[in-house]
Image (cartoon, rainbow, N blue to C red):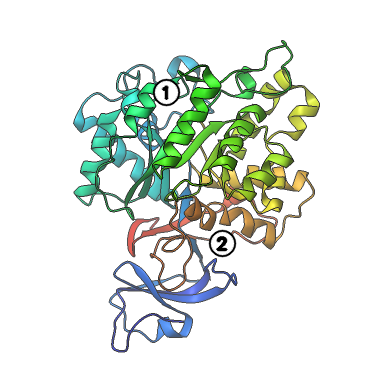
Amino acid sequence: MSTALPGDDADLLLRGGRIHTFDEHDSVATAIAVRDGVVVAVDADAEALPARATVELDGRTAVPGINDAHLHAAWLGARWPHLFFSDTPPEQQPSGRLVATAGERRSTLRRAWRLLAELGITSYTEPGIGPGEDAGETGCFGSDMLDAYVQLHREGGQTSRVTLLRLFGTIDGESTLDDFAAGIQVPPPDTDPRWLAIPGVKIFADGIPPLATAWTAEPYADGTTGHLLTRGDADPLSAFQRMVELAAARGLQIAVHATGDRSIAEFLGVLERLNDAPPAPGPHYVVHGDLATPAQIARMRAVGAGFAVQPLIATHTHSWAEAQLGEARTAAAWPLAEMLVSGVLTTLTSDAPIATPDWRPSLDASLQLVTAAGARDDVHTRRRLLRSMTTEAARQDGAARWKGTLEPGRVADLTVLDEDPLAAGRAFADLTVERTIVDGRTVYARD
């Protein structure tokens, strides 16, 4: 298959390995040709094109570039190599103001992009940057960081594609209806959405189950049920509902941090009432969804919304959550298997720097969750998990027409691995990233 015209040359030819295209037929190619950053041909059609440069895969495997659909890159770049779930003791964790100047903001983004390139990550979602954090402790989430993103973008300095959500409250904290209503009236800066898309907003609805701050229908061990973080209007719930309605009316994509079943239910209730809202650039979705019920998962699919989940965080916090939820409720938490079976839009993400940005341990944690629920460790399961970090993530970005697969017409974003990640029985963490290509350009090569 080819979109190249007779006489066209290719800028780059990759050949001699296994290339999982993740097209609708799950085709496996042996070669692809790239011109102007776009895949133009595969297999024999690709080999027939004269190429200015050739990458010999030598039996290695290429997949569509990894897309982490929930990763705080600015915060990661400022903290790296320190993660919240790591061996770094609390007294050695970075604290206070992490970035304070324009130069530091630019440097922290470049540091993050270098790290992501080494990990084979070609796209990510920066979930929450805006004026609500202008006085924030770390300096990683305010308007100045948005300015740094835009400046580097306009200079052509990116090696990762970015989807950025604006924030009109505080990270993991409260937001007011007045601030939100005023903020969404300010248009985002003009950008090339293939490199820096700013399609919507992030809203923090609640906290997390281990701290008993997720809003739940059933009480925790101490008798509380958590609460909403939104403020204004008559009460927190009406403020939250109004925020979602206002954002939807402006055609914005809405991502809601919601871990409790009650907060998820209220978000769903508003989505199901949005009959006349203009289309958003990408589907609305719940971030985390730890305590989503099977019925909520089905309803989310019915309204075309989805979930961005973090299986590695589930591994880290399982026992901590069990102390609050009890054994039975914890066993039903993090329902990744149900999400995948239902067909609802599901992306696997890191939430770095909470957990490692390395996608390979996240896939191992995901595989553990779904096999514990009865799935087999086979090519089909592994492909479905990897699609959640490639094709499904592109869907969440509203970019499935131009990225997320390696078929002609899609951008040439690739992750080259030493072995086939779909082969059963090998830990994903044992795979080695050999090369990362973004827009047809190598941004990392191990050798």
Residue at position x 70%, y 42% in the image: 369
Q: Which residue is mark 2?
A: 419
Residue at position x 29%, y 41% in the image: 110
Between 421 and 197, the one nearer to me in the picture: 197
Between 153 and 203, the one nearer to me in the picture: 203
Q: Which residue is mark 1?
A: 177
Residue at position x 59%, y 33% in the image: 313
Query: Residue 215: x and y, percent?
Result: 63, 23
Q: How many C-alpha atoms fall within 10 Å of the one at disc 1: few (<14), some, or many (≥20)?
A: many
Query: Residue 385: x and y, percent?
Result: 62, 53
First in residue order: circle 1 vs circle 2: 1
Q: Identify whether 262 is placed above or below 47.
A: above
Report the side of 420 relative to 131 (left or right): right
Residue at position x 46%, y 76% in the image: 31
Please, what secondary structure does the residue beneath circle 2 have?
Answer: loop
Query: Residue 137: x and y, percent?
Result: 35, 18
Determine which of the numbered discs, if any, sits on residue 194 in the image. Answer: none
Q: Is there any visible trace of residue 356 in the rendered image?
A: no
Report the side of 226 relative to 162 (left or right): right
Three-letter amino acid code at disc 1?
Leu
Three-letter amino acid code at disc 2?
Glu
Query: Residue 315: x and y, percent?
Result: 65, 34
Identify the image quadrant of residue 6. Answer: bottom left
Between 102 and 30, the one nearer to me in the picture: 102
Measured in 3D between alpha carbons, the distance from the residue under mark 1 to the one under mark 2, in whole angstroms, is: 50 Å
